[in-house]
Structure formats: structure tokens, C-alpha cells
Amino acid sequence: MDGRGFMFPVDTAIGKNGRMHTVSRAYAPAAAQLRITMYDIESEYFGIYGGYGESLGQFRWPTGMASDSMGNIYVSDELNNRINVFSHEGDPIKYWGEAGSGEGELNGPSGIAFDSEGNLFVSDHMNNRIQKFTKDGKFILSFGNKGRNTLNMPWGVFVSSDGFVYVADWGNDCIAKYDSSGGFIRSFGNRGSEDGQFKNPSGVAVDKDGYIYVTDWGNERLEILDKNGNFIQTIRGQATISKWADEYFEGNYEEAEPRSRSNLEPNPVQFGGDPHEESAHIEKLFWGPTSVKLDDEGRVYVTESNRHRVQIFERAV
Amino acid sequence: MVSASTDVKLMAHLLRRAGFGATKEQLDQYISIGYDRVVDSLIDNEDSSRIDNALVRRYFPDQSVTHDTTGAGSYWLYRMVSTDSPLREKIALFWHNVFATGYTKVTNGKPMSDQLRMFRSHGLAKLDELLLKLSRDPAMIIWLDNVDNHNGAINENYGRELLELFSMGVGNYNEDDIKECSRAFTGWSIANSDYIKQLAVRNSIMPYGKLAWRYEYKEEDHDEGEKTFLGHKGNFNGEEIIDIICAQPATARFISRHLYHFFVADEPPVPSWPYKEPQDLAAISILEKAYFDSGYDIGEMIRVLFNSDFFKSDTCHYKKIKSPAELAGNVLRTTEEFGTPNIRISERNSQITFMGQQLLNPPSVEGWHQGLEWIETGSLTERVNFASQHLGDLSKPGVRRIVQNVMDDEGECISASVCVDKCLDQLGAIQTSQYIYDTLVEFAQENGIPSINLVKDKENAAKKISELMSVVASVPEFQQS
């Protein structure tokens, strides 16, 4: 299936020349919608690639994305237990990965991230660990599933420019920080909805100043912490009408007209403090924020599966 | 043929009707608690599930937004398979059939799922509370056009069905009552109604997926005038209409008959009720009394029902045909295929549809006509294939454990009759007719079960026993409740 738009997108990679690649996970009866869409920040559309299946260039449960120094796009597949590699133009190159729980084997690879040396960290979530591979899939090390502070179904992973590994520890409701060898350093946050707390965080990213961005999936928000883990800011979502949506309404007056008379920002109090329900009713809010990514210009990209969109923020300072 | 004790048979009967059946291991636990306390816990326990919502939403964003029948139906199937409060799901199925609301017109699974959530949480509450929730339910407001029911220009659709299909039944009111009832519900609408109606008609997901719907009372559109309803006169709003409805003996009869039909034994189709007396008038009278004694409390009516002689009587065991959802819930809970979220759930949901019951999409406002109408040539084949395929699949953890339980304590060999006895027992103390029992024993014999060494040829024995389970899944008593 061709065309713009996303269907349950779960991650975005910032690729070569500022081109963005967003993977749509879709769902079983709509497998034809499962694909990666290429576009840029001006909403210029460059096409799609990938699709449902188990052959080269295909995936079934795509989850995480990362771009290497050459601009190649890597996509994890939780169900096929593999990492797919595409060129920056979307041509399939190869895939690697074997199912299992032994060293180098995968059981539900989700978030992925490169370090500055070109090695790929994979959140091997059903094995409750992070694994480090060369970009060709050669196993280097794993950590997170032994001793104290073991991970619990980790999702997003990020490697900072100074080599620290941050993990969105989904099942433990915190962000875990490791050194480049997998040595546990500390964790940030605990379960809750207050400032600095998390409910099932899905993604994490750290900017050049050390600020930590977390998609707090269960609370349907983006939280920003300083480098010491102190709470800085919460963002619930501020979506506007995208260029693609605007063009849709230009051709669909029957929807545009009654929409213009509608209240799409009802008082959230009536939804009983349930963020899932608030986001279901209030269109501009994040709903299912599954990843946060940063670009070199300091912009923040939040992919939200349930609203089929990516919200992009400029850093205020 | 081994006959289970009365306690076991009764507990198995209760769990088939109040839930989705129970294996021997589960029955043993329930029996240790005692029948009365199990009844109380089924009714009084809060909704809980072994699979956390977050876990389902992580893997299935379509089940997080529930925007269509695939996502919403699959999510509901998860609930049935994983719930620790099976009566909550059964009562949701019950009201989903009585207050039948269909996706074909609503075209948004989220309000449908919200309605089911309301049935789960309020389906065992007092009827007046439930009818009030129903009257404010956005899916119902679109389904029966109350969104177009305006002051000075009534739409009678909801008012008519509220009386005919949701509370009293034909013959207990007249056309003027319908009009007056409809006037009372003017202004009971949804927010952004023009936009929502347009999106529903176009089945549009643009620009950012389907919006959730919410109830909105439009005071300026409500008819404040005096109304005369069922002999009562006043400036009624919807709340007062519901109070009057719930006080009617006809409502007590109608709800009692529905509960009897769902939990005890099949009554004729609802349209014939005005002309046919209930098959067990004494039982209906007991339920009617419970209705008034408890202040219209559905949970209390069901407590009386489960503790009654007419429910416990052997004569009503296996007299109902499991709906496709009940059958699937029973099979998938037994196989334990879905201990964690699994991509095959939407496939299983589709199989329920092939058996004749698309969840969230009943065929009409009358719901599904249950009983023998579940059994047609095509649907029967689907039912048997579904149950046999899954209960005969040794890769499923629940099946493997049951097979192991059958082999345990048998030494090196097992006779055909003992193997059949243990399979029936493990699957929930199933009592078959002598003819069916003899047929199963004959199959076990011809399939070579008695000649297999259970110790030296364990895998072959397991395979043969799983094949016997597959046949058990096809017998009438397994397909019945």
C-alpha cells in the first residue's frame, strides 16, 4: 500500500540529510499498512519501504529504529527476532538475529541504539537484558539480567555521546543507567504519576547538555529530567494539524466544517484522572508515546502509536 | 462410566454458566471453598484479570485504541480468557445481547468497548442505575438515534426500544407512552454530535485516528413540558422515566425471563414472549420477587438464581448450547495459549465470527437468537474444528498438563475406559450420555491407547491421549453448557 500517513507508528529514525523514517506497526488484518515512511520536517514525502513478512526487507512486529553513521536504517522485529538493515533509500540490505535466550540470541528485540563506535545496543526485552552487537550482528556483551537491579521487559535504549547506556525499564517503571561495559550505575524514578515518576516508560534519549527525555508511556507524557535525574518538565502533547492533515481537510469539507465547530479539548477532569482516557478524548495530547528521538538541531521527536503521528518540539533554551 | 459426585457436578455446572467452565484443577480449588462462597465471590468480586492492560497495549496498539471490531473484539477475548472474575465477562456478554449495539452503525470500537466496560462494572448493579448509564452511553445514543431526538422533533427509536427490548416488552405500554418516553430523553446526546455523526457515517479515521465519544446533556434541546407516561404525569426527564419503568411488574418479568434464558434454560425468542408463558413460571416468580426485594438489584437476582433448586437441578445441566464466545473462552482458558499476549488472538477472534458471533456486532437490536440457532451446518463444523484443533494440540501448555495428569498414577498402561474417564474429568467433570461414553471408549480402544507403554513410549501416549481430547471436544456435552 502506497501513500502518506502512518498506521500505529512505534518509532522514528533520523536518517541521512535530515530525512525521517517512521515505522508503522499496523495490526494483523491491516498488514498491508505495515511499512516505513520516509519524509522530512517540512512534510515532504519520499516514499515507503519494508512490509509484512519474514523475507529480506520484511518484518512482523517492528518496534525500534536506529540509523548508523552511514545513514543505514536498522529496524528491530520483536516477532521474527531479528534486526533488519536497509539503506538510507530504503533498499533492503540484510537481516541478522537468532531466536533464543543464549548469548547473542534474541527474544523480542525492541528498542535499539548505536554507540559512537558503531556498535548496536538491543533491548532484548523478553530476556530482560540489553545486548551489544557489532552492526553486523556479532555478539559483544550483554547485561541487565543478573544480580540486583535486573531489568524487567526493557523497551527503549539510548547511548549518550560519552558512552553511557540509558534504558527505559518498562516493567520496573524507571530509567536505568549503565556504563559502556554494562556496569549498573543508577536508576531514575519509580512508579507513579507525580513529577519525576514513571508508569511503564517506553523510550529515553539524552541531549548534549545531559538532559534526559523520557516517553512516560503509561502516563501518556514526555518527561524531562536533568543529568542528575531531577525533574525539569512534563509535556502532555501539543499537536496541531499537520500539513498532510490540512490537505485532507481541504478536500473533505464534510468533515472539516463540523470539526471547526467542535470542542476537541474538553475538560480532562471528567475522565477520572486516567491518562489513557484523557488522551483518547483530547486529540492534541500524546496517546501511546512509544519513542523519543533527538536530532542535531536540538529538536525532540515523539512517536505516538495511538494517534498515528509524530510530534516535534524545538528546545526552548 | 464414572459419575462425579453431586458437589463436583454442581460446581462444574455453576462454572459453565457463571463463567467459561473450569478444569479439574480449578474445580478442586472451587470445591474446597464451597458452593455458596463461590457464588458470593463470583458476584461480589471486583473485576480483575491475569493479563495487565498495559501488557496488551504494549504489543497491540489496535487493542489499545480499540477503534474497530478486530482490536476491540480481540481485546474482549483477552478479557474472557484471562479474567479472574468470569461472571463480569459473562454479564457483559448477557447485556451485550439484551442491549444489542452494533459496530456496523457505530463504526467506532472505542465507544463500543466503553459500553462493555460499563456492563462489566455496572452489569450486576441495580437496574435503574444500569438503564441510566445505558441512556447516557454514547454508542447507544448513536446506535438508536437519540442524537437525533430533539425538542419538538422527537426520534422515537431509543424510547421505543427502551420499552420494547430493554425493559418491559411488547404489550405493556402504548404508542403514546413511546412518544412521551422519547420526549423525556430529548437532549440526551453526545459532544460534538455533528462531527461525530459525520465521522461515523464516513467511517473516517482522519486525521489522527478515531476520537473517543462522550455523553453531553443539551439542556436547550430538552423538552421540559409535562408528560404522561404509564399513567404518571409530570415534567419528566429521563431519570424519572427510568424510575417508573423499573417499578413495573412487566420489567421484573422481562428481566427475570432474560436471566433465566441466559443462565438456566433456553426460553423462546423474545418476540414471542407476549404470547408464550415462561416454561418455569415458579422460577420466574422467585426471580421477580428477588428483583423487588432487592430494589431492582441484578446481582442479588443472580445470587438467588444460582442458589435456587431450579438452577441446581440436574434437569437443566447441559441444556444450553454454548455461544461461540463461551465456547472459545472455555477452550482457550483450558489450553492456556494466551498466558501472555500473543499475535494469534485476532485469529481466534475471527474464528468466533466464523462460528456465528462477531463480538461487538450483533445482527440486530434483538441481539443473537441463541439456543439451537447457534447450530447450523457451517457453524457446527467451525465449532467442532475449533475445539478439536486446540484441545488436541499438545504444544499448548494447558493441553500438555491435562494429558500428563491423565497419565499420572497409571503405571505403564491405561485402559480405554479409564483414559476416557480421566479426560472427561480433567476437562471439567463432563457427564456424557452412555452412548457418547461408549463411543469415546471405542475410539480410545481403536486408537491403540491401552497397548501403549506410558513409560517407554510417553510421547506416543501423549499424542494418542491428545487425539482423544480432540474427539471429546466434539461431543455434544462439551459443546453444551
Image (cartoon, coloured by chain):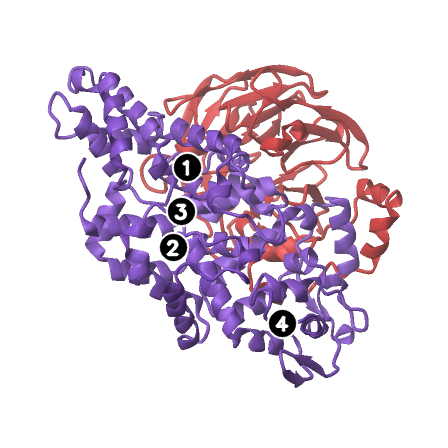
Chain colours: A red, B purple
Packing grade of label 3 (10 A; few <14, some 14-19, many >=20) is many
Q: Quadrant of the C terminus of chain B?
A: top left
Q: Are marks 3 and 2 on the same chain?
A: yes
The mark that comes first in sequence, 2 or 4, is 4
Q: Secondary structure at mark 2?
A: loop
Packing grade of label 2 (10 A; few <14, some 14-19, many >=20) is many
At x 82%, y 60%, the residue is A261
Kindly report which numbered mark, 2 or 4, lies closer to the viewer in this rendering: 4
The mark that comes first in sequence, 3 or 2, is 2
Residue at the spot of label 2? B264
Packing grade of label 4 (10 A; few <14, some 14-19, many >=20) is some
Image: B285 above or below B397: below
Residue B56 seen from this side: no
Residue type, numbered disc 4: Tyr
Q: Are marks 3 and 1 on the same chain?
A: yes
- Which residue of the protein is positioned furthest toward the front in this rendering? B275
Residue type, numbered disc 1: Phe
Residue at the spot of label 4? B173
